[in-house]
Image: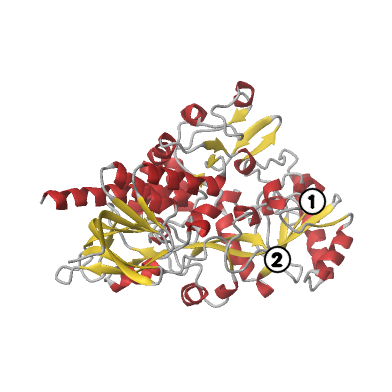
Amino acid sequence: MAFDETYDVVVVGGGNAGFSAATTAAQAGARVCLVEKAPLDDAGGNTFYTAAAFRCCFDGLPDLLPHLYHSDGTKGLPQELIDNIEMTPYTKANFHADIRRVTKGRADPVLADILVDNSREAVQWLMDNGARFVLSFNRQSYNVDGKYRFWGGMVLTMVGQGKELFQFHLDTARKHGVETCFSSAAVDLIADPSTNEAVGVKVLEAGAIKTIGARGGVILACGGFQASSALRTQYLGPGWDLAHVRGSKYNTGDGHAMAKKLGAKLEGNYSGCHSVAWDGNSPRASGNRELTNQYTKSGYPLGVMVNINGKRFVDEGFDLRNFTYAIFGKEILKQPQGVAFQVWDADGSQYLRAEEYADDVTTNLRAETIEQLADILATKGLKDKRQFLQTVAEFNDACKSFQEEHQDKTFDPSVKDGMSTQGTKKSLELGKTNWAMPIEKGPFQAVEVTCGITFTFGGLAVTPDAEVVSEASFQKIDGLYCTGELLGGLFWDNYPGGSGLTMGTVMGRIAGREAARRAKRCRTA
């Protein structure tokens, strides 16, 4: 079969997963081409818009210290800072328990094992290739009694977040000889007509179709369908066309369509997605390349969220933030007009992260009294001021009643502190399980939020070697691999924060390694 160009491995998609696959294949000796739909100045997939947080198993702080950078980009941490860090190991048992809990036991056990067992190696591979990781002080720790208490198991992020992660991958791939082609949209897979083996890809580049052969195989790493309002409505349901897109506008289900045409088996939670509380004033159709992840509004455990009718609609504190933030966008979208308000008093707002809540990032609504705040919210869409004030008053009464009954409990944002609204004398119909403190000390603060969709959970079925599975035979489709957010079966309804990027690197490395091996076998056959 004749092609315009031929490589050992062709990767479709230039985010964390795709570049992990491409670089791994190149390091294994393969000649690799990576094609990306976006132009270079708009590239990086969802990776570019992330906080670049990676969840992995680790044996406590000493395991990570030799590889860490300071926030200013210099290697190593000062001893006085190390002495004030409290961090427990995150074991494989911990990781598995978190996956089972948040996915309600639906996660594919084989994929979960692959993620957990390879998580530390994947992060180490990034470190060994020059990725600069820091401890996520601002996102995953609170300063309690002079100590930085890390919580939730996810402690690592990159110095420059998603922007740096993308640039790191691009530089590393090019260093190892990967040919990168931007503004090159893969439009179809090329299969051997007698075997259905994937042997290449058709690419639309500069208005013309180009065919690229792949001796070892094609690796699909081109994301989910979250940027397609039509597919969101088709699979996620009515109203999802109104969600704001957090990241890349180019993730429109191309990989699903190409693979399905070749007979791939679709797999996973097609009615589910990762969606967060997102700035109500954010762009609707794509992320902002300057602010990126700063539009996330994850301070809700420290206060309350109310809809435009002035009523709470979720338990803001039922779990640690990195186990709830990916599901609360969906709950906001269910509310009238698909918006809500996050509300804090002076005590709660002091814990808000500046990167998400600074005045140059979001529109903060402030007032000295809760009544004045209600008046301001009414100008922003609040329909029932009286109900809002009643909601806050009842919430405050329940908090105080619980505290009177449980004087041994104290507020601690770094753990599930059990500070609840659900006492024996008073309780709410919709309680708050942890971090329930009265909202009564001015000044008061609120922000408007909507649903920001990150990625979709439905994707392609794969083998443990990242090979795409055939719907007809339930066997692998030779030469076709999958990684990243196109992978189906792992995440259902929710996910442990930071595990998406980790799985992208884990499965990307597996795909890259296997495709390179296959190319080598084809060359020597």
Pick the front one: 166 or 378: 166
Q: Residues within 10 Å of mark 2 (few under 14, many from 20)?
A: many
Q: Amino acid at mark 2?
A: Ala
Residue tagged 2: 340
Residue tagged 1: 438
Q: Quadrant of the N terminus?
A: bottom left
Give the side of residue 34 with respect to residue 514, left or right. right
Task: Say which residue appears at 33% left-offset and 71% top-offset.
Answer: 209
Q: Which mark is residue 100?
A: none
Question: Would you say residue 113 is visible in this rendering?
Answer: no
Q: Marks 1/2: CA distance?
A: 20 Å
Q: What secondary structure is found at the residue carrying circle 2?
A: strand
Does residue 393 lie above or below 115 as drawn?
below
Task: Say which residue appears at 53% left-offset and 33% top-offset.
Answer: 88
Q: Amino acid at mark 1?
A: Pro
Give the side of residue 390 with respect to residue 262, left or right. right
Give the side of residue 339 with respect to residue 74, left or right. right
Residue 284 horizontal/vertical position (percent)? 61, 68
Q: Earlier in the sequence, mark 1 or mark 2?
A: 2
Pick the front one: 296 or 439: 296
Question: Would you say residue 352 is visible in this rendering?
Answer: yes
Q: What secondary structure is found at the residue carrying circle 1?
A: loop
Q: Quadrant of residue 378?
A: bottom right
